[in-house]
Image (cartoon, coloured by chain):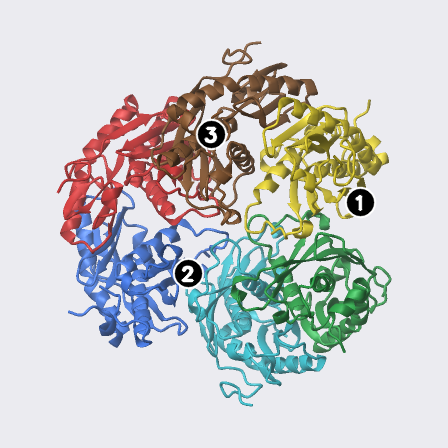
Chain colours: A brown, B red, C blue, D cyan, E green, F yellow
Amino acid sequence: MARIDNRANNELRVISVQPDFIPTASGSVLIACGNTRVLCTAMVEEKVPGFLAGSGKGWLTAEYSMLPASTLTRKARDRKGGVDGRSVEIQRLIGRSLRAAFDLTRLGERSITIDCDVIQADGGTRTASITGGFIAAAMAIDKLMQEGKLEESPIVRGICAISAGVVEGEVRVDLCYEEDSRADADVNVIMTDDGRLIEVQGTAEGAPFAREELNAIIDGAMAASAVLVEKQKEALGEAWNRVMPKN
Amino acid sequence: MARIDNRANNELRVISVQPDFIPTASGSVLIACGNTRVLCTAMVEEKVPGFLAGSGKGWLTAEYSMLPASTLTRKARDRKGGVDGRSVEIQRLIGRSLRAAFDLTRLGERSITIDCDVIQADGGTRTASITGGFIAAAMAIDKLMQEGKLEESPIVRGICAISAGVVEGEVRVDLCYEEDSRADADVNVIMTDDGRLIEVQGTAEGAPFAREELNAIIDGAMAASAVLVEKQKEALGEAWNRVMPKN
Amino acid sequence: MARIDNRANNELRVISVQPDFIPTASGSVLIACGNTRVLCTAMVEEKVPGFLAGSGKGWLTAEYSMLPASTLTRKARDRKGGVDGRSVEIQRLIGRSLRAAFDLTRLGERSITIDCDVIQADGGTRTASITGGFIAAAMAIDKLMQEGKLEESPIVRGICAISAGVVEGEVRVDLCYEEDSRADADVNVIMTDDGRLIEVQGTAEGAPFAREELNAIIDGAMAASAVLVEKQKEALGEAWNRVMPKN
Amino acid sequence: MARIDNRANNELRVISVQPDFIPTASGSVLIACGNTRVLCTAMVEEKVPGFLAGSGKGWLTAEYSMLPASTLTRKARDRKGGVDGRSVEIQRLIGRSLRAAFDLTRLGERSITIDCDVIQADGGTRTASITGGFIAAAMAIDKLMQEGKLEESPIVRGICAISAGVVEGEVRVDLCYEEDSRADADVNVIMTDDGRLIEVQGTAEGAPFAREELNAIIDGAMAASAVLVEKQKEALGEAWNRVMPKN
Amino acid sequence: MARIDNRANNELRVISVQPDFIPTASGSVLIACGNTRVLCTAMVEEKVPGFLAGSGKGWLTAEYSMLPASTLTRKARDRKGGVDGRSVEIQRLIGRSLRAAFDLTRLGERSITIDCDVIQADGGTRTASITGGFIAAAMAIDKLMQEGKLEESPIVRGICAISAGVVEGEVRVDLCYEEDSRADADVNVIMTDDGRLIEVQGTAEGAPFAREELNAIIDGAMAASAVLVEKQKEALGEAWNRVMPKN
Amino acid sequence: MARIDNRANNELRVISVQPDFIPTASGSVLIACGNTRVLCTAMVEEKVPGFLAGSGKGWLTAEYSMLPASTLTRKARDRKGGVDGRSVEIQRLIGRSLRAAFDLTRLGERSITIDCDVIQADGGTRTASITGGFIAAAMAIDKLMQEGKLEESPIVRGICAISAGVVEGEVRVDLCYEEDSRADADVNVIMTDDGRLIEVQGTAEGAPFAREELNAIIDGAMAASAVLVEKQKEALGEAWNRVMPKN
């Protein structure tokens, strides 16, 4: 059966990355995966949270938020105290995943905050945030190196992410909202640029899923990694070579 | 003495308006006034606050927020409960000003929320929010009319806004951040499209200002109104004629 | 057409100032402008906010709050987190205006908090807060000087405030609540004791107002300044001469 | 040994009650017990909390707050969410005590809120709040009866309160702050106008106290009841007879 | 008339104390008084609140909370900011009472937090918290002494607590929920192990109570002290002798 | 290499389940998995959240909280507004997983809240919460059926959970805290009683993990399912047959 946008089951949506969307940030991209658009920025601060003070080690954290107009029904802002549960869950995933790209002892006592503000939501906002957030983080590192504040890049590997799931009995990658809402299983896969895994979050949406389905889904997701890394490389241009580990 | 960007004292920064920046919104623009960029969206909800329930009357309100990366130093989000004082003051001004464009009894029992999210801040974010917010609101009205939900437009006049002030002893319009921080007086002027006043907020930044200075500043600001209205008309295209009052 | 209380259009309501209403405060007045009554107190603390620590400079800030019984319908306290938007807007205006009276580098690293608690609200609470708050602040400075903690007064000018507006087509000063709710335009004017302007906030309540109306309103407000300064002088007695700039 | 203000051990501080201090309230007094001054107001609302809706029964509750300037060191307002623990404890005591004066089934489905705002604190603010709060509540009832909204008064008894304690080995009533801070035991006694008890809260401040001491303290407090009731009667004037139970 | 569980009027419910219920705590007990069960733990932290920093003095505080399932109707958690008023009142009582057992100057600059989590509520949770909290606190002291962090115990006396009241015209001790809800008067008595008083909180639930009733209730409560102390001794075993004052 | 507690790599810690630990709850267990102990309760309320009102459908949600004394360093309560991020993430997982056991359209318009309060934390608290939470939920259903409020059980399958990971290069199940903190990969697997998957959350703790490692870990976890289901059956006794789907 055809997908709603006629993509092949293993085909990603069109990805476009607009770098330096916000010049005030150390790094920024507006990443679009189909109709999903996320503004990812990296801000560097010359301080660390209390539990790291004096450790010589740096920190990286993430915040995720949807603009009120990013969905058809206006989403209220988190202004009453506390952040809504789904955003907490997502931003913890983003931060955890991106920290895996870093050897934070090499960052020095500074913090990088990755802000992911969803401009338009059509499924896959958390994986787009990770893929785009890595680019913003890498830009920020490149800037610190250009400014002479860092000699060596603390980045130890590339990180990207994609969702995949079972829809209408078929394994499909990069679900849009319409597919996601009908999926039987939905898995977010966070990967390294050399084909290993950082985090796997698979959820049965309707019926439970079988072990073999999980395998097929993860296979589908991991096959998409090459395209994602290519887009990241393209967006970073020369900076990619400066910040990524040699070998 | 020359301005930092060589503009004439009565010259606005380049204004560009990108309509429909967020397709999920009823109305949206990314408005740029020089380096200040604000994403203004209008979302319609078929309900009103409690104090208007059963009145047959509609409501319009605004929320203002700066993205964390919109300034050189990361601005923390309003997530701890309460909104920071400056944002409260600004969003109240935006809402009050835009309500003056409407006869809300003609909107029916529905609410329009104007969200102004600052992408990049370089002075004049509140006036850009009003000028852009009016466009987004007008788009939302046009959509309600196209959908047959409104027969008659509730818009009774156009609204736009600009800042002006005294810098280095000279009256200048549309201050950028660098000028704003050195201004002796800074006035935000919210105007109608026919040259009357909706709100005037003038503040002495350093020394008190004289009555004549206030007059000169307001004159400067009001002279800019034609350019602003032109930009709004351009962004709305055909819709302008459909939603604006005839006469 | 006659005003509700038979005042002339340019006539203020009866102002009475009861100094030292709260002996525990460094400075305090119960100021009444007609039926509007505000308790203004100044408390000195030997510390400054973080952004001024080590700067040698002092700070002045204001908080505004209405007692629950100050209006006919009980006003809920701000106890759920966050302060209501109108109070935020007002207290920011009060603080900003009163800071214009001071050269804070001469205050030393201490803070003055002006608390304005509205006992009874009948229009003009924010301007009464500024006029009364200045007296309380001046009393606190006098006390610091008497105690030998300050040699020189950091006050560089006097500040007072009044509202004026257009009601029934006539320019009137010092609107009471009943007039305010029917006004076409309402302007709060914060002035120095020598006839210059600190802040002007003018809002169209119904229809937009014309440039000439604004001029007439501001003229009306500024003419009231002499009475306000006289009341402040009277309340401060000998202290006026001690804390105000010479010549 | 003489008391700091030369009172006899069983002598109350001078009590003065200024009725109708806030005309917008249904009932209000500014009660002073020595240097302790509390503004007590009663506001009536024609609604009840959810748990009483449809019950035909009314409600009475209290809120207690200290003005920032009521103590020598500025007391921060409860604006960050949550009320400080001491205020919670006190306002629960005030509400509970005053509810004992009422047969709330006779109030109808309306609420009375007693607001106790401390203008100046010198010990005994909670007992002054109860004694003054009763007067404000009675005024509100009288007003409801005058307006024809209530035929019969729901007040079933008078309530007043005083503190007593052991200071320097002697039982003393109505402790001021200076005595309170040196007291070995401090007891707040809430009484009816016919000499029975509503609440007794006794706390050892330093060493534990003996059973006999408690007895002596309560005796001392109860002896003061006549003076308190007399002051309440005086403040209420004719209204006392209209609202108090006949027998 | 017989009590609901056939106890004599002066008879306590069965008390059982399970020490070391949570091995991660410095001290812990699960105390049951009839169907009321409270988990009391003591945690030691090597820091003090700001107001004691540098004083050499320690601190003890308490937190009280009911598990959502501890009552037949689910009790919502205190997660929205602020703690519910009743819990605030109770935890302040627990903290104040247990501090009376200590000479905190002998604790050194460390804090003990007594957490009282109600597993099942059937009346008397606050007094069970105090009686059990003392045991947990004493265990924590014993551990500090065993670890060589304290040479001398800072405990100066034992503390226990019980409620008593008038039900059906009879003075009864240790009211269960069913009795408590029908009581005319309810008094919580916090006592020392040598028969003196720390705090007495007596409240008329229905009608006011007479002076003699209060006396009879307190007598009833104080007579129960021996049983409570015995249970505390039993739970502490050898540690009792190590931490309690000699002679 | 031997595990810290000498278990085989595929061996679970000792599980003990104490049913009916809190009689006031509709269902409750104290579940212990080694030193990890969680109190799981189910409370039924005859109402649903707003978004389900009138739908005829029920709801199930979960709250997770650690007692302050459950870890060696006291964990502060969530009382300042907002819940800590980790708890949000965990309670969302618990609720989502347990909802997969239910056909909520068969529950009627009522809510079940599963409260998971950690008494002692030694790794695996979220999986113990799910395994124990299912028992509590099933007890609550059984009670509703016994009371005649439900004719048919809404439970469509059993749910249990376990963690597994790679420690010292070996795949091990049911990691305790000490192992968890040294693990290279840690996966929480939520399963049905017939060997299918509900949710898989795998995280690289140090280095990324390979696809084959994930497979081995999930295999290890799924093999443990039989033991978990057996424990659930045992705890539910006769109720198991009453609430579980036939055939």
Image position of B115 (left or right of E113) = left
Closer to us: A195 or A164: A195
Cα distance between the residues tagged 3 and 2? 55 Å
Q: Position of residue E90 (x, y in %)?
A: 65, 61
Camera-near label (3 vs 1) is 3
Q: Nearer the viewer, mark 3 or mark 2?
A: 3
Label 1 element class: loop
Instruction: Name the residue located 70 percent from the left edge and 80 percent from the top edge.
Output: D210
Q: Which residue is mark 2?
A: C70
Q: Are marks 1 and 2 on the same chain?
A: no
Residue type at numbered disc 2: Ser
Q: Distance between the Cα atoms at labels 3 and 1?
A: 49 Å
What residue sits 25% from the left and 76% below the top? C238
Discs 3, 2: same chain? no
Q: Amino acid at mark 1?
A: Asp
What amino acid does circle 3 point to? Phe
Where's the C terminus of chain F, which quadrant?
Answer: top right
Looking at the image, residue C177 sits to the left or right of residue E9; the answer is left
Disc 1: host chain: F
Query: What's the distance in space between the residues labelled 1 and 2, CA to CA?
Result: 54 Å
Residue assigned mark 3: A134
Q: Is residue B92 above or below residue C9?
A: above
- Label 3 in the same subunit as label 1: no
Asked if labels 2 and 3 touch by Cβ distance under 8 angstroms, the answer is no
As drawn, the label of residue F20 is 1
Give residue F195's position: percent from left, percent from top: 75, 24
| Label 3 Cα crowd, 10 Å radius (few <14 / some 14-19 / many 20+) | many
Q: Nearer the viewer, residue C4 or B40?
A: B40
Q: Which image quarter is the N terminus of chain F in?
A: top right
- Residue D179 higher or lower than C67, as above or below: below
Q: Vertically, is F163 above or below F219?
A: below
